[in-house]
Amino acid sequence: MKILNLKFKNINSLAGEQKIDFTKPEFTDSGLFAITGKTGAGKSSILDAISLALYGKTPRVEITGQSNDVMTRGATDCYSEIVFEIGGKKWKSSWKQERTRTGNLKPVNRQIADSTDKIHADQVRGCDSKIIEIMGLTFEQFTKVILLAQGDFAAFLQADKNDKGELLEKMTGTEIYGEISRKVFDRNKTEKEKLDQINLQLVEIKILSDEEIKTIENELSELEIQKKRIDDEIQLIETAKKRLADLENLQKQIAGAKQKLPDLQQKVELAEKAFEQSEATLKAIKTEKETGEKIWIKVRELDT
């Protein structure tokens, strides 16, 4: 993160509008600079302005809806705006709060925009999430890693040897490594207990002799033979089941045919009667034909 510009108004003892351009040669040429001054001159107020512009709060003073001790006493408004560069992209983040005519605090106004003045967040919760996304740090991490509060550094310098490690973890955020160490110890303990249980189970496992292994192999061979025989029997049973199913279908077809048999017999009887009648008719026609032929022969003779 590289701070480019900082503008603020009525922050703590720094009344009125203030502006710091960190792109000027006196800042860029040296590479390292210090903010110095007497107590109460406003050194920490500059850091408060940076923290307010980014996260809407400071590590020293808590701001609530009813109380804003950061605003210069007697002032009716205060704001802080920072322009910074991170990952090759410029951002502008601002924070502002005013008082009403009766002295009550108005809601906080926050805004985050890019270098083209496109607004990416303009609500408090949205700005909280967006600045963490841009910075890659929460407020607590920012105040421990980048903006180190004056009180924490003084406590570190004055602490005894046993407390410095804990304070150093607090300021730099390295307490996570202590937590990792504790978790590793607990995990190691748990896994060791599992390993001990496995070793106990291994002791209980009986190692077979060559003779016992050969006996088991013979039993397996016998079981394989039995399995093959059973599989063959199962195949025969399946074939028999299929034949039974086919037989049942045939029996159903026979039963259906038997039900149709009386109708068929009746039709056969009717057909036989019709055949007999047809034969009688045919016989009569033949007799009539023979008689006609005789008459026809006599007629021919008479004609002759």
Image: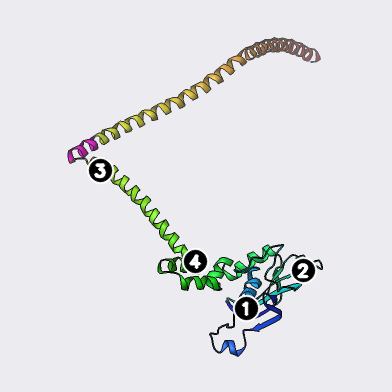
Residue type beneath disc 3: Val
Task: Identify the residue at image location x=65%, y=14%.
Answer: 263
Q: Is residue 86 visible?
A: yes
N-terminal label among 2 and 1: 1
Q: Is residue 111 left or right of residue 176?
A: right
**Between disc 3 and disc 2, whose residue precedes?**
2
Q: Disc 2 to disc 4, how far (Cα)?
A: 36 Å
Q: Are marks 3 and 2 in contact (CB under 8 Å)?
A: no
Q: Quadrant of the N terminus?
A: bottom right
Judging by the rendered image, the residue that carries numbered circle 2 is 99
Q: x, y percentage for residue 205?
A: 26, 41
Is disc 3 surrounded by few (<14), some (14 to 19) or many (20+) residues within 10 Å?
few
**Residue placed most toward the observer, 92 or 9:** 9
Residue 112 shown left or right of residue 238 in the figure: right
Residue beneath label 4, please?
A: 170
Q: Which marked residue is nearer to the observer: mark 4 or mark 1?
A: 1
Q: Which residues are magenta?
A: 210-218
Q: Which residue is mark 3?
A: 203
Amino acid type at mark 2? Arg
